[in-house]
Amino acid sequence: MEHGGDLLSYEGYYDGKLVDYSSNINPLGSPKGLEKVIMNGFKDLESYPDVKYRKLKKSVGKYLNCKAENTILGNGAVELIDNFTLLANRVLVCTPSFSEYEQRALIHDKELIRIPYNEDFTVNLKAIKDAIQQGDMLILGNPNNPTGLRIEMEELILIYTIVKKFGGFLLIDEAFFEFCPIDYDSIELFKQTDYKNLGIIRAATKFFALPGIRLGYGCTSLDMVEKIEEIQLPWNINTLAEIAGRYIFQYKEYIKESKRYIDQERKYLLKGLSNISGIKPYFTNSNFILIKLLNWNEEYIFNYFLNRGIVIRKCSSFKGLDDNFIRIAIKDRNGNNRLIKIFKELEESK
Amino acid sequence: MEHGGDLLSYEGYYDGKLVDYSSNINPLGSPKGLEKVIMNGFKDLESYPDVKYRKLKKSVGKYLNCKAENTILGNGAVELIDNFTLLANRVLVCTPSFSEYEQRALIHDKELIRIPYNEDFTVNLKAIKDAIQQGDMLILGNPNNPTGLRIEMEELILIYTIVKKFGGFLLIDEAFFEFCPIDYDSIELFKQTDYKNLGIIRAATKFFALPGIRLGYGCTSLDMVEKIEEIQLPWNINTLAEIAGRYIFQYKEYIKESKRYIDQERKYLLKGLSNISGIKPYFTNSNFILIKLLNWNEEYIFNYFLNRGIVIRKCSSFKGLDDNFIRIAIKDRNGNNRLIKIFKELEESK
């Protein structure tokens, strides 16, 4: 298994500071003022966190616009994925997608069904309909990693209807939700269902630029909340992560500005890359771009960028992709220009 | 299931600030200078932690005096307990002990065998010998919670020999290790075995007074390290916990002073309580004391202390204890005097 952000493994291959384009973090950095908030919370480390995380659940509920009772918390979104997986019978995963969907299923000895996305990376509805059975959990990234595509609203409703009809459970991983241009909010969309047979996961990791804080959260039905909290490790959230959560979720300006900025840079970088021959960048609703390499393999491109101080994400470790794919993060204007420049050099080097 | 430290559940029952005697934290507080170290690490929150935690494992190895390759890390010791449990066939638990031993076994659908401690809370060796089979994991608290007793060195060697002989695995939970008067160090003791069929778990929670940081660690065989890291959640340790770990483990003076202080206060409090009729405090090697109530039940005593601003731990939720037991933490001199004073009032109120 492989993950982005593992810069330490490549230290020594480049004479200088490596820049990480292999993990996808908000280029504006973490919300201003958080440093002080965390410092003020230092003394709280000497007590156990509230084992029920009452205050944090209230903040999350307010931020997600759902009831605090419907919220769940994880040591990163990946712990919640693990929790839902443990409670499922079989696990249906669409490929390519985040490797931990499969990994957690395997670890908990769950039967795993792989359903490839269509060629344009939209969901293969028919294949899901054919496969799904009572007690199965279908996991979908929305937007999906590494493809970057968001599921259309009508399609998501249709998927949910099918999954529910067959007695399955739909887990929507929205770790990149806030980066999407707003058209619908799944938590709002499914409110009237009381999240029956449905879980929606989000995270502070990417959008709030806090991968080190380990704070995932989500929303599901009351009976599922009970089941998850029953199996979770006690005190799974670090006290400073709890304090950070309660601060960042109410920081409306930061959230608004980050969305605007990412939208602008996504358009800029997609346009810049579209002019380069030899690569095919896929349309994205997130803050990363999947790129098909037409003239090289991932290894060649990885080293080409590494020699220039940049770590990108090779994609052959994603089931369903071969070694002709890479993924890159959308950064600030300078970062994006740097990327475009290197791709241009590459194009000319042919 | 119930845990100590849940003060929020009792707010409103007392007109003032509640003091927690239900969880067992070093009364000297966290190591001096840690606040600054954490602050300096704030910016690191914006990158993923090293997914292999190379630096932290090195620090832990140095602190435990074992190879970094033999170390494992958890989001609190409880995550490591969970990991070991997932890898076991059946789970053998001695009662009374930390409720999560049973809880994690049940969650992972493992057959659970309960072996009561002897009446003096020493290990029932014969019962273990009779029960243990190939692939079983025996978990022992050392010192054990809530009894406070440490296993004698010769006995621990004997237990390990038996467990290994029958192809079992011995997991020693030493979350309270540093509070013990030093006589032997199990990591040193079992060094020549390369920790085959053996895991030893410790934690920053209690001794370093950092329950909010969530940092458990331990030592086991190389093949078990590999298995555990294979099933663990990626990035399970918060970046600030990682930074804290690297600082606290090398702080020799704090460690020495804490040991001396706890030893002194343990003797003081045990002596103070021994003069009170109606209660039987058990000898302890840790920073908490199990008390048998001879004239009252736990509910009465819990409320008696709550009315005086103190939260103690009721013990009937521990399998193997009834409602005639409570557990209290050893605190600083003022705190211990406060406790003795209330017990004296209680004695006189009879």
Image (spheres, coloured by chain):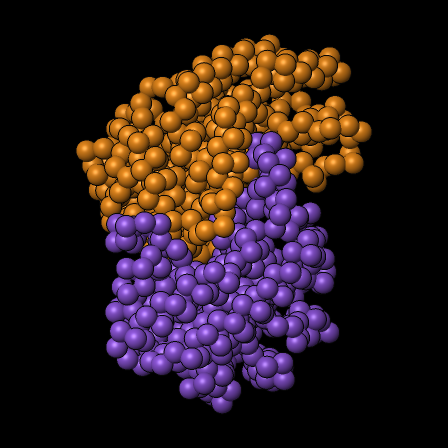
Chain colours: A purple, B orange
- The residue closer to the viewer here, A134 or B8, is B8
Q: Can residue A325 be seen by looking at this rendering?
A: yes
Quadrant in which residue A323 is drawn:
bottom left
Residue at 64% across / 60% down in the picture? A257
Residue A142, horizontal then vertical, whole percent: 54, 72
Residue A105, horizontal then vertical, whole percent: 41, 66
The answer to whether residue B303 is above or below residue B217 is above
The answer to whether residue B275 is above or below residue B148 is above
Q: Can residue B324 be seen by looking at this rendering?
A: no
* Position of the C terminus of chain A by quadrant: bottom left
Quadrant in which residue A107 is drawn:
bottom left
Farthest residue, direction left: B192
The answer to whether residue A312 is above or below residue B76 is below
- The residue closer to the viewer here, B278 or B13, is B13
Residue at 46% across / 65% down in the picture? A336
Farthest residue, direction right: B15
Residue at 71% across / 63% down in the picture? A66
Lateral position of residue B308 relative to residue A317, left or right:
right
Residue at 55% across / 22% down in the picture? B27
Lateral position of residue A169 relative to residue B184, left or right:
right
Residue A175, horizontal then vertical, whole percent: 54, 64
Lateral position of residue B32 relative to residue A346, left or right:
right
Residue A111, horizontal then vertical, whole percent: 40, 72
The total of numbered circles placed on residues is: 0
* Position of the N terminus of chain A by quadrant: bottom left
The answer to whether residue B26 is above or below residue B166 is above
Lateral position of residue B238 relative to residue A292, left or right:
right
